[in-house]
Image (cartoon, rainbow, N blue to C red):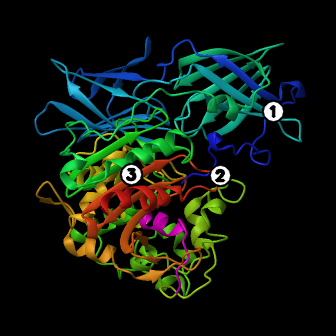
Amino acid sequence: MLKRLTILGFLSFSTLLSCSQKKDRGYQGNWVGTLTDKKSFNFSITLEELNSKDYHLVIANDKTLIDKTLKSTSGDHIQIHIDDKTYIDLYGGSSGRTLAGFMKSGRYFYHVILQHAGGNRFTGTWNPFMLDDGLISDDILLYVENNNDGTMVAYPFFGDKRFRGAWASDFKMKDDRLSFRDDNTGFLYRATLLKNTIGLEIYFSDARVAKANLSRSDMDWEDRIAAVDFDQDQNTDTPPQLNDGWTTGSINDFSINNRELLRLIDSINSKKLINTHSVLVAKEGELVFETYFDGFNANIPHDQRSASKSISSAMIGIAIDDKTIESVDQRLFDFIPAAYQYTKDALKSKIRIKDLLTMSSGLDVNNRASEGYYQEPGNSNNWLKTVLEAPMVKEPGTYADYGSANPFLLGICLNEALKIPLDIYMDEKLFAPLGITNYINQTDDKEMIPYFGGGMLLTPRDMLKFGQLYLDKGMWKGKQIISKKWIEESFGKHVRLQDVGDKNEYGYLWWHDTYVVKGRAIKSIEARGAGGQFIFVIPELESVVVVTSGNFRNGKGNQSRKILKEYILPSMLN
């Protein structure tokens, strides 16, 4: 997962950023303004084919932002470049009624679908902030900070708890204007520093999306965002039947205790269980419990953090199933590009795919190959180079230390082995067969391939699908998507993690844990992500449980496990 999210308060990057001239230090502090439209960041896309290569593209919110005739740069599908960092990559469905693919903007591959709208026109939507219902608050906040060398930086926030955050970079100063980029969405920000106000404009490519006049605020941005309330109903009724592949059912049909689930809802609403965003339960293949909090809903993809490492594992299994990768015993350096082969030594040459899957590569993942190190621009301008140059601290396959460098390297391996883009392969082989259409792939530092170390965004229902796929030995709706053999190998207890408190047994990027409830030891296999993102697969109870949360900096990332142990499992063990 990328570390430098402003919503998480990582606000001091003075060693990384610079401006061309000094500004009055009186601008430092919090500034707040009002957006003219809370749905400014909900876009429509219209694409019309003019001939075999030329397309008319219109992107709009309440006004037209992009209106251009552009040429496709691909011969076998539609690839349209809006600028040097932003493009749309679309493939036609067999029916000719849809175009599906990705909007690439910033670090994100946003999966988009355009429906046929008559003639040669296709239309769809794109929500860069992933919020289908628009921002709940029209507040926009800017924290301005002065560096010790006299330069200036600034970090944007929106008055909506669901806003994932900006990765602010590339600060530049010209006259009274400070400009910077959000590397996550690709949006450009321009702050004009006036006498008593700051005029803030937000651009997608060269089109202005939103603007606001900001005044100084005495309230800290975290306090202002925390003060925004959400009026939202929760209950234990049968979840709504949506056209997403899930069959829904009643907890009463499975003897699940309603009182325990109501107690859970009350504990979340009363802030005994803080920052819980969703809780979902599937029992015997049916979705039977679904609740959302803090404005989240079934249509908003949630940051997975490291929970998406388990999806990275699935993609390696699929690649082995279709012979793209020979086996888990194939060596890392069979895939590493020629430009980096110089990093190979006697120990590194022994690293296998299996060692990366089990966190036992032997690389120095707690220091020079740690995610916090190789993602920090002050340490590295090339993640792969930094990771491969890191020292070995153990013999491969002999000792397991948890570290995102391992799955990051798996993504490099699979990308090198494929003849098609990795994001397309993932969609064709896993997401499309599961009916998963509303998701975002986060990229690595080159912004070209999905980052296998974590940070995908999926809706909670789709997280639950992924867990159900593993519970059902790789089957979904009668189709074998991943081989039963891979599922069983993935759920094996291959190593014991040495650098985590519980020293959990560990599979192929899946955690093992046991919960003692009402005198019974219930075993769970889990996808886990920072902040409280969990997929619990519980074979003994034929159940899958998903919890998403926002506990990133408060030491409560394991609260989701408490929810399972003290509320969900007791409701099932009557």
Residue 144: image quadrant is top right
Marking on residue 20: 1
Q: Which amino acid does label 2 sit on?
A: Asn
Relative to 569, is 326 above or below? below
Kindly identify the residue that appears in the image at 62 percent across and 39 percent down.
7
Q: Distance between the residues labelled 3 and 1?
A: 59 Å
Q: Is mark 2 on a helix, strand or loop?
A: loop
Q: What element carries label 3?
A: helix
Q: Which amino acid does label 1 sit on?
A: Ser
Q: Counting residues from the N terminus, which is met first, the one under dot 3 or under dot 1?
A: 1
Residue 425 visible in the displayed image? no
Q: What residue would you read off at disc 2?
A: 554
Relative to 569, is 156 above or below? above
Q: Distance between the residues labelled 1 and 2?
A: 37 Å
Is residue 473 rendered magenta in the image?
no
Say which of marks 3 and 1 sits in front. Answer: 3
Say which of marks 2 and 3 sits in front. Answer: 3
Query: Where residue 371 sits: x, y (%)?
Result: 60, 62
Q: What residue would you read off at disc 3?
A: 260
Kindly identify the residue that appears in the image at 88 percent across and 36 percent down.
150
Marking on residue 88: none
Q: Which amino acid does label 3 sit on?
A: Glu
Is residue 405 rendered magenta in the image?
yes
Q: Counting residues from the N terminus, which is met first, the one under dot 1 or under dot 2?
A: 1
Residue 551 visible in the displayed image? yes
Residues in magenta, as a range: 399-412
